[in-house]
Image (cartoon, rainbow, N blue to C red):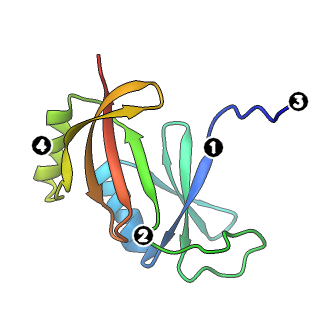
Amino acid sequence: MAVAVERLDHLVLTARDLEATCAWYERVLGMTRQLFDGDRVALAYGRQKINVHPYPSPVWPLVADIAIPGSLDLCFVVEGPIEAVVAELEALGEPVELGPVARTGALGAITSVYLRDPDRNLVELAVYAA
């Protein structure tokens, strides 16, 4: 029998500047910073979280072999309409690199805009078709 994955619980983002990265995700995407295991940091949203590791990372027992800032391509489903998302990004002074554009998400048609976080990770914000 194959392993049956239910859902993604968390992923790890590697940041050159932990404070700047957390502040950006809080300000732009409304995530909530959490401390865990004493001094580790996560960004919570919905029922998921992103653990944020500093770069270079302290020696923890389990870290990615090649964890470098700017190597992620993330897609977040957001509440629409996409025009309101773009307007909010503009109000925050966050440049949109591309979009709105039609794409295909895990559950079907989406409309997306793309921007960059402080480490230049690609961040896609997507709204599913009604």
Mark 3, residues whose alpha carbon is within 10 Å: few (<14), some, or many (≥20)? few
Q: Secondary structure at mark 1?
A: loop
Secondary structure category for the residue under label 2: loop
Dot 4: within a 10 Å radius of its alpha carbon, few (fewer than 14), some, or many (20 or more) residues? few
Q: Earlier in the sequence, mark 4 or mark 1?
A: 1
Vertical position of residue 82 compared to residue 97: above or below: above
Question: How far separated are the C-alphas under marks 1 and 3?
Answer: 22 Å
- Checking the image for residue 70, the label placed there is 2
Type of the residue with mark 1: Asp
Residue 29 higher or lower than 128, as above or below? below
Side of 30 where 49 appears, left or right: right
Q: Which mark is drawn over residue 1?
A: 3
**Amino acid identity at mark 4:** Ala
Q: Which mark is residue 9?
A: 1
Task: Describe the element under mark 3 as helix, strand or loop.
Answer: loop
- Residue type at mark 2 is Gly
- Picture residue at 44% right of the left edge, 79% below the top: 16
**Nearer to us: label 3 or label 4:** 3
| Residue 49 place in picture, x, y as percent | 55, 49
**Image quarter of residue 75:** top left
